[in-house]
Amino acid sequence: MPALTDSYGRVHRDLRISVTDRCNYRCTYCMPADGLDWLPREDLLSFEEIERVARVCVEHHGIDSIRLTGGEPTVRHGLPELVARLARLGVDIALTTNGSRLSALARPLAEAGLRRINISCDSLHDGRFAAMTRRDDLPNVLAGIAAALEAGLHPVKLNVVLRRSVNDDEALAFAEFGRATGVTVRFIEFMPLDADGGWTSAEVVPGSEIVAAIAAVHPVEPVRRGHEPAARWRYLDGRGEIGVIDSVTEPFCASCDRIRLTADGRLRSCLFATDEVDLRPTLRGGGDDEAIAGIVAATVAAKGPGHQIGQVAFVRPHRSMSQIGG
Ligand code: SAM
Ligand code: SF4
């Protein structure tokens, strides 16, 4: 089986699938205050179509890791059924969620074959959480984190986006939450994929600053970096680790191994791609598996060297994070 390689020699093994563009939150850094127009139902890929694209990527291209995302994936009806279908492909299945529905869903998802989960949470203060997500829901998310741990999902990771003067005083509190609960906290730098187009570099809290603030209280040492986007640090006292996805200040494009499928069936070779390829005409027009595999290979082959955030040449993609899937 030929590896899914781009013109820079990067082999792609990780498929990220957005299962919906809908969301029950409107996080300030991801969605506009009055929300976005949802895709018409018929534009969404069906479970059969998602499963087919995933199977072709696994069988023809050696994809060995699939992450479901959104919008908010848990608002898609029947998500455990989709997880069960994908688990039958025999690859690693993970989920990124805001955690709001996990109290009810963590166990069915685990029973369907989900192994790993990332739960997004940007503040441990009720009022600030409500302001950031535009929904007063922190207790529910904390209950969702507990339900994920109880259901045996492992690892449970917490995705935290710190923004300057918004929640940058919470790095240590999140680290201590992780140390107390066994959850691995990963800090993600704020990226120019906000729906309002208001991103400025002044709002980015560099990963190095976050690690320094935590290490001053709980000393850490670096963990050797593999293909994963997170730079990892382990506590010297053995109480777990933290990760930093410093995609703005330390781009990891040179080792990126991801491709993305949007909820409406478009393939994207990069989070910041300004072009995408619509798979629906092939999926719905009688195209065979070879045709799908060919489109995937061509999309990856055409992948650029990486994003150019902070440079004159940077062009912001027309989709925001909730429409691509983080
Ligand atoms: N709704 C789910 C959630 O919140 O986890 C999945 C989709 S969300 C788009 C995936 C991840 O993207 C979340 O961890 C979120 O914090 C992150 N995210 C959204 N907008 C972002 C931005 N502008 N910069 C950095 N991360 C962002
Ligand atoms: Fe929804 Fe996730 Fe975006 Fe928040 S970050 S608005 S939960 S998609």
Image: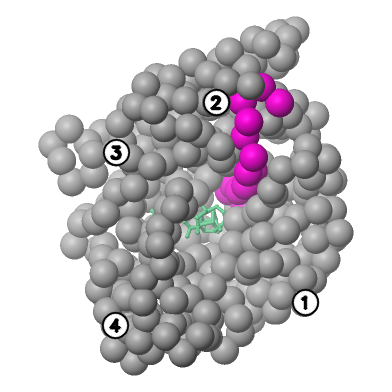
* Residue 289, quarter of the rendered image: top right
Q: Choose mark 2 or mark 1, whichever is in front.
A: 2
Task: Name the residue tied to disc 3.
Answer: 307
Alpha carbons under labels 1 and 4: distance apart: 30 Å
Task: Name the residue tied to disc 4.
Answer: 213
The local secondary structure at tag 3 comes to loop
Res. 1 visible in picture = yes
Specify the quadrant that holds the N terminus.
Answer: top right
When the figure is inspected, residue 128 is found, relative to residue 301, above or below; the finding is below
Q: Which of marks 3 and 1 is nearer the N terminus?
A: 1
* Residue 188, quarter of the rendered image: bottom left
Q: Which of marks 2 and 4 is nearer the N terminus?
A: 2
Alpha carbons under labels 3 and 1: distance apart: 38 Å
Q: Residue 150 carries which label?
A: 1
Q: Is residue 173 found inside the magenta-colored segment of the image?
A: no
The local secondary structure at tag 4 comes to helix
Residue at image point 54% right, 65% down: 120
**How far from the left and from the top, in percent, is residue 314?**
22, 36
Amino acid at circle 4: Ala
Amino acid at circle 2: Ala
Q: Which of marks 4 and 3 is nearer the N terminus?
A: 4
Q: What stretch is highlighted in magenta?
A: 59-72
Q: Choose mark 3 or mark 2, whichever is in front.
A: 2
Q: Which mark is residue 3?
A: 2
Q: Which of marks 2 and 1 is nearer the N terminus?
A: 2
